[in-house]
C-alpha cells in the first residue's frame, strides 16, 4: 500500500510524458504533417503537453512526497496507514515543501556544476528536509536547517541511503537502454522512478523518525 500514492502519481506523469514523447517520435513526413508544423500547431501541441507535464509535477509532486513521512510514522506507531489523511496533511504544507524542494534543487545544481562533491554534500544535508517539515511542522527554511543539522550528524549513513536510491536509478537506466521502443522505455523509467521515489522517502522518513 505504501507504493500506491507514488504509483498513482507516476502513472499520471508517465501518461503525460508518453503524450509528449509521441509528438517528437512522429515520423510522418506527408504534406499534411509538414503543413501542421508550418502552421505552428505542432509547436503549440509541444508547448501544451510540456506545460501540462510541468504543472502536474509541481502540483502533485510535493503532496505525494510530503505524505510519506506521515504514513511511515503511522506504520512505526502501529496505526493504520491513513493515505487520505496523509495526503491532506501534506497538502496543508504544500508551499513549504515546494519552496524547500526548489531551494534544495537549486543548491544541489550549483554544487554539482562547481564540482560534483559539493553537490553531493549539499544533497546529504537536505536529504531529510521533507520529513523535517512534515513531522516537526516546520516551514521551508526551518526544515532545511533541521535537515542540515541531522544530515551532518549522520553523513555517512545518509550517503549510504543515497547510494541505494541511485543504484535503483542506474538499474532502470540500464534496462531502458536495452529497449528499442521509446514508449516502453518511458514506462520502464516510470516503474523505476516509482520504486526510487518510494524507497527514498521511506528510508529518509524512517531514519529521521528513529534517530532525531
Image (cartoon, grey):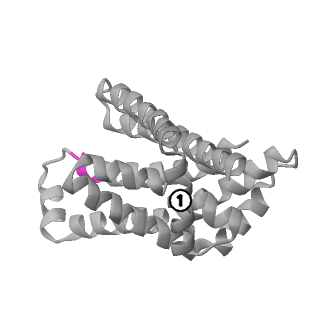
Give left or right: position of 96 versus 84.
left
37 to 22, vertically: above or below: below
Disc 1 on helix, strand or loop? Answer: helix
Is 59 inside the magenta-drawn segment?
A: no
Specify the quadrant of the image occupied by residue 150: bottom right
Residue 59 can be seen, yes or no:
no
Judging depth in this view, the residue of 43 and 113 nearest the camera is 113
Q: Residue at x 70, y 62 (%)?
A: 135
134 to 95, vertically: above or below: above
Which residue in the protein does label 1 denote? 149
Q: Residue at x 28, y 63 (%)?
A: 46
Specify the quadrant of the image occupied by residue 53: bottom left
Judging depth in this view, the residue of 13 and 6 nearest the camera is 6
Q: Residue at x 18, y 46 (%)?
A: 28
Quadrant of the image for the N terminus? top right
Q: In the current view of this chain or complex, which residue is farthest to the right?
A: 79
Q: Position of residue 125 (x, y in %)?
A: 46, 55
Q: Position of residue 91 (x, y in %)?
A: 65, 70
Report the predominant secondary structure element of the magenta stretch: helix
Judging depth in this view, the residue of 112 and 172 nearest the camera is 112
167 to 69, vertically: above or below: above
Judging depth in this view, the residue of 34 and 54 nearest the camera is 54
Q: Magenta residues, as a range?
A: 22-26
Q: In the current view of this chain or complex, which residue is farthest to the front?
A: 153
Q: Position of residue 103 (x, y in %)?
A: 41, 69
Give left or right: position of 199 versus 126.
right
Count neighbours of disc 1 (C-alpha within 10 A) and say few if under 14, some if 14 to 19, many if 20 or more.
some
Q: Residue at x 53, y 59 (%)?
A: 149
145 to 191, vertically: above or below: below
Q: Position of residue 48 (x, y in %)?
A: 34, 69
Amino acid at each position: 500500500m505504501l507504493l500506491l500514492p507514488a504509483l498513482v502519481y507516476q502513472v499520471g506523469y508517465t501518461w503525460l510524458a508518453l503524450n509528449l514523447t509521441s509528438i517528437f517520435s512522429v515520423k510522418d513526413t506527408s504534406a499534411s504533417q509538414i503543413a501542421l508544423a508550418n502552421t505552428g500547431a505542432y509547436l503549440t501541441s509541444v508547448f501544451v503537453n510540456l506545460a501540462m507535464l510541468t504543472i502536474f509535477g509541481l502540483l502533485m509532486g510535493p503532496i505525494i512526497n510530503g505524505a510519506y513521512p506521515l504514513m511511515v510514522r503511522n506504520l512505526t506507531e502501529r496505526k493504520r496507514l491513513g493515505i487520505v489523511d496523509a495526503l491532506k496533511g501534506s497538502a496543508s504544507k504544500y508551499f513549504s515543501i515546494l519552496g524547500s524542494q526548489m531551494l534544495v534543487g537549486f543548491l544541489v545544481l550549483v554544487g554539482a556544476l562547481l564540482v560534483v562533491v559539493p553537490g553531493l554534500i549539499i544533497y546529504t544535508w537536505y536529504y531529510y528536509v521533507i520529513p523535517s517539515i512534515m513531522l516537526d511542522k516546520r516551514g521551508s527554511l526551518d526544515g532545511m536547517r533541521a535537515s542540515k543539522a541531522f544530515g551532518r550528524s549522520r553523513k555517512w549513513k545518509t550517503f549510504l541511503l543515497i547510494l541505494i536510491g541511485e543504484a535503483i536509478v542506474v538499474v532502470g537506466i540500464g534496462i531502458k537502454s536495452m529497449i528499442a521502443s521509446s514508449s516502453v522505455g518511458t514506462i520502464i523509467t516510470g516503474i523505476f522512478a516509482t520504486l526510487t521515489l518510494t524507497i527514498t522517502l521511506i528510508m529518509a522518513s524512517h531514519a529521521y523518525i528513529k534517530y532525531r
